[in-house]
Amino acid sequence: MHNKDCTCWNCPAIDLVGKVDFRACGQSVEDFRKRMGLEEDSFQLIAECKRRRELGLFDPMSVTFKECPEWEKTQYGYLLKDMRVMILGIDGYLGWALALWLGSQGCQVSGVDNYSRRDWVKERGAHTVIPISRMSERLHTAKEVLNIDINYREIDILNERDRLKEFIDEVKPEVIVHYGECPSAPYSMIDADHAIFVQKNNVLGTLGVLFSMKELVPETSLIKLGTMGEYGTPLTGRPLFEGMFPADAVLQWDNREWSLGGELTPRDPVSFYHASKVQDTINIYEACKYWWLRSYDVMQGVIYGVHTEQVSADPRLRTRLDIDEWFGTVINRFVAQAIIGIPLTLHGSGEQIRGLIALEDAMQCMTRLIASPPEPGQYAVVNQMSGYYSLRELAKTVAKIGKEEFNLPVKIQRVENPRVESERHPFEPIYENLTKKFGFKPSVTLEEEIYRMFKLFIQPDIKSRIEEKKHHIIPKTWWSGEKRKVETIEILK
Amino acid sequence: MYEKKLNREKRTVIIGLDGVPFRLIDKFTKNNIMPETKKLIEKGTFKQMESTIPEISSVAWSSIITGKNPGEHGIFGYTDIPIGTYRLSFPNFNNLKAPPFWQKDSMGRSIIINVPSTFPVKPLNGVHISGFVSLDLKRSVYPDSLIQKLTDIGYQIDVDSSKAHKSIDLFLEDLDRTLKSRISAYKYLWEKEKWQTFMLVFTGTDRLSHFLWDAYENENHKYHSAFTKHFCQIDEVIGEIVNNLYEDDLLILLSDHGFELLEKEVNINYLLKKNGFLKLKPESRRSFADMETGTKAFALEPARIYINLKDKYPRGSVKKDEYRGIIKDLTSIFEDLELKGRKIIKKTYRKEEIYKGPYMNQAPDLVLVPNKGFNLKASVKADQLFEKSIFAGKHTQHDAFLLINNLAEKNILPDEITVSDVCHLIETLQTENMNLRRKIDA
């Protein structure tokens, strides 16, 4: 078990109640969450367990998860019994799938949403090609089919902070998973209103969450969705480390050398949406430093796929799936294009390389992160991806499966690139933390998940929903501000 | 001021001065820094008193208030590792296995202020404000209704000792603020509450001595006058209390242990590691949870040695028939320990020599008492045997004090008095008084 040696120091069920220097028979009334200086190394932090009050006061580092009966062995490591997990953005593609996944692991799931994803997609004239029902019906079905109770509250986390605080205070979540942001680069590039909205919604919404956590649940871990797009694709070819430089990284300049170990790596976002994620990174990093909050910032690769055991259990439990130019991700869009006979669209050269992860594997990663909370004050980053491919390779894979398994005549086309990005670039992502520290092993191959997607999309009701909105697949949003459909450069053989 | 009444109970007042040695009181009364205390000594009984082993406030005050030795009251130090775990726990009032004297009917209504290791408070006939370690005011005060008043007067449970790491001046300011808030609280309760027993402990004396014992010993030290000023202030309070007593009230002044100059800190767990008795995981976070199988012994603060017995601890590896041999080996290592020709350990006690009672199983197997100037520590983080820290003073075992007024029968005190005798003394005197009262009433 990868987290067997984690201790109560990591556990959100712990109240840190005091700071004592037994050598001087002294205690301190100073806020013990302030980072301790070297001179205070002798202070002993004292904890109380919220779940096992009978333990009295103790050193939080002296009890391991393995020894604590509140932490139970699961296939994802030791997991806190009945762990209270709050998902912000529970109605979304990832949020809903995670809610069902964690519910089936025995977590007590609560969630918040204001249906803005539904509204944004509707505003653009698109829709989810996998139909989803109203939240009340989703909750009812989760109970009926999977026996999962979800404590849901409709809240706008940006504009209804008091209500969010009230809900947090009521639930006292031990983990908050933050999916509650606008996840679209093209949406943020439509015009000034959209750019301002995305940055305000994402950055200020998250800032409010940080303040609420500080006030109400400082021991709770925050697992926040970032994106590999925060790093961009630097032409220097330097590795894309997991958020921070490793201990042995060195900067050389002017015949001098500096260690870079532990510093945030440079970010090179590729849209105003990605820039909002970078600002989130900085704000979370600071909150962990100032207030001893704890967080994993999840730099997720491009997500794709439709399957988890829970969402596949009943058509009414399916999670949404978008294929439009604003909210559709690359593989999801390719499979939809293949189904209705539109050539798969590569932007520019199609040589851009992206890290990817399937929905099911993303859920596994999140569960493993939830099971191993960070230490107080710890800000850590994981690059959440299971492999990386050029867009051209991905298109070929989709075309091959479509052709061989479903007898579809799939073509690939190169179109003008509406984005400002490197079309040919080095790419060396480092994605070791999840496998080495959290025991992640991908459970599904690219081909397997693409096959599952074809199987689902080929169903008449879904195919007709794709047909209905096919005019929204080809991009019209240019980073330059132009509003025109991209032209086809070439149909590939 | 109180008027004398004929039909009243004789009252008991106990003033504790944490960590104040007999010889400091002797010196400060002779040189008139504590003139009020001097008057008490002239009329009363003033004796040197042995502390507990180890000479730790939590252990000593637990013995003072219960009259029991650690084997009976279950408190062996600030830290403990419960049997069957390696959880480093911090015993508190909930873990005290013997009742404090104020829970006895004969003591009447009691006001108890700032007795160390009495957090969290429990209901009693009277008022209780707990002392170090008290983590929040809510669980430190009985009854709850008093919390607002204490908040209004800015009551501080203890001086913030982290300030001393930043600036001695800041620490002294906070020490003064804490003392003044304690004085305000005692005055309020003395006047507003009805009581038969009043116990007030000053703990700033101990904190001051930890950081500035060198200033006490050296009259030219920058902070010498700050040190003496603190004792002057306490002496004034003592005078004030004496003036408010009836002639036949019982007044006891006492400390829990003494103090002396700290020359070197000695890391006992480092010694155990070096000699192969303590084994931690190679990449240890330096916590007791990282103890590996193969560990034969470990130490808890200040120098309580526990044998890692099989069937007693999760990764215990010492069989019962190996116990004596290991005790012997350890004793020999400790007794041979020297620094520049000076023996560090004065005496190594086996638990049977110093403890008795139902909680012997939780007692350390060995307890070390150091020679003058050496402060024993049990941090698992230490990576050297000897250290010099910012602390100037350290506790001593033999040099606490006891001062009693109105002790008609001096033979009630044993020749060699220890802190465990105090409770019995209080109860005896109080019972005598009750019997006398009954006779008068009859």
Image (spheres, helix red, strand yellow):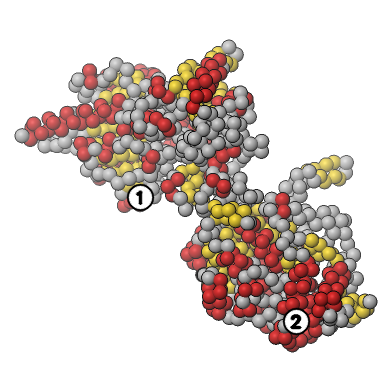
Q: Nearer the viewer, residue A13 or B388?
A: A13
* Labelled pair 2, 1 in contact (Cβ < 8 Å): no
The residue shown at (60%, 13%) is B340
Q: Which residue is mark 1?
A: B147
For marks 2 and 1, give the CA distance.
Answer: 70 Å
Horizontal side of B384 relative to A388 (left or right) equals left
Q: Nearer the viewer, mark 2 or mark 1?
A: 2
Which residue lies at the image location 8% right of the left edge and 32% below the top edge? Answer: B440
**Residue B147 position (above or below residue A146):** above
* Chain letter for mark 1: B
Q: Chain of mark 2?
A: A
* Residue nearer the viewer, A9 or B199: A9
Q: Residue A60: x percent and y percent?
A: 53, 44
**Which residue was labeled with disc 2?**
A458
The disc placed on residue B192 is: none
Corner quadrant of residue A89: bottom right
Q: Is residue B359 left or right of residue A16?
A: left
Residue B62 in view of the camera: no
Q: Residue at x 18, y 33 (%)?
A: B10
How far across and how far down the image is residue B231, in percent? 39, 28
Image height of B147 relative to B216, above or below: below
Amino acid type of the residue that numbered disc 2 sits on in the rendered structure:
Ile
The answer to which quarter of the image holds residue B112 is top left
Q: The disc labelled 1 sits on which kind of residue?
A: Ile
- Give the position of the N terminus of chain B as an image quadrant: top left
Q: Are marks 2 and 1 on the same chain?
A: no
Is B91 drawn above or below residue A132 in the view shown?
Answer: above
> Where, by quadrant of the figure, is residue A392 drawn?
bottom right
